[in-house]
Amino acid sequence: TSKSAAVSLTVQRQTTRTNLAASPNPISFGQPLALIATVTRSGTTSPTGAVSFLNGPRALGTASDTTSPTGVVSFLNGSTLLGTVLLNPSGVATLSIPSLAGATNSLRAQYAGAGSYLASASAAVAVTVKAQSTTTRLVASPNPVNTRQALTLTATVKGSGTSVPTGSVS
């Protein structure tokens, strides 16, 4: 019998790239928004498939790699977590947001890394939220009113979107 020297093999984790798309952009206040993160391998020449390790005719084991990263993507607005979604087999995660507040939001997607894939983050995507237009209706009661008689003014504000306007009327 003969023995060979032990061979050390280090398998490095694959770098990834995370891209984020927001649709539609811009949106109106109260309008839903879809966030789509796509996680891909950074290199285009990476081999895929399985490798078998043998000792003569005896199989010692196999190692394989999937073609798309697996794991979860976290969606953030600044530092606020909007949600975490599992990647589908194609490396895509989608999160639907019912609405966003504020004029401009800075959204990012962060891939946590899993298995043989390293973590990565998208560039920030600015999503502008347009204020909805409003109409104000003022009703005086009673109408007509007599001198020194109490008068009630009621203002009704309606927005052009699906959300109810808030704030004060002066």
Image: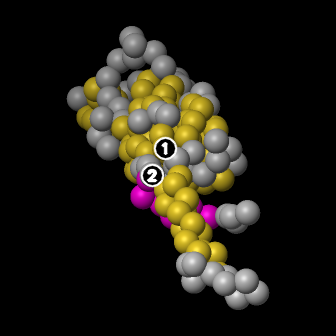
Say which mark, if any, is on residue 28: 1
**Residue 129 drawn above or below residue 83:** above
Q: Where is residue 96 in the image (x, y as percent from the top left)?
A: 41, 50
Count of marks, rendered view: 2
Identity of the amino acid at label 1?
Answer: Ser
Quarter of the picture holding the N terminus: top left
Secondary structure, mark 1, is: strand
**Residue 160 drawn above or below residue 107:** below
Measured in 3D between alpha carbons, the distance from the residue under mark 1 to the one under mark 2, in whole angstroms, is 9 Å
Circle 2 Cα neighbour tier, 10 Å, few/some/many (<14 / 14–19 / ≥20): some
Q: In front here: 91 or 32?
A: 32
Tell me, yes or no, if residue 11 can be seen here: no
Examine the image and state in which quarter residue 129 appears.
top right
Which residue is rendered at x = 44% and y = 53% of the image? Answer: 161
Q: Where is residue 50 in the image (x, y as percent from the top left)?
A: 29, 29
Please check the rendered image and state whether residue 163 is part of the magenta-colored stretch, yes or no: yes
Circle 1 Cα neighbour tier, 10 Å, few/some/many (<14 / 14–19 / ≥20): many
Which residue is rendered at x = 60% and y = 28% of the image? Answer: 123
The residue furthest front is 147
Image marks 1 and 2: residues in contact by CB distance under 8 Å: yes
Q: Nearer the viewer, mark 1 or mark 2?
A: 2
Tell me, yes or no, if residue 20 can be seen here: yes
Q: Where is residue 55 in the image (x, y as percent from the top left)?
A: 33, 30
Compared across the picture, whether 62 is left or right of 101 comes to left
Secondary structure, mark 2, is: loop
Quarter of the picture holding the C terminus: bottom right
Instruction: List the residue tagged with mark 2.
Output: 160
Identity of the amino acid at label 2?
Answer: Ser
Range of the magenta residues?
161-166
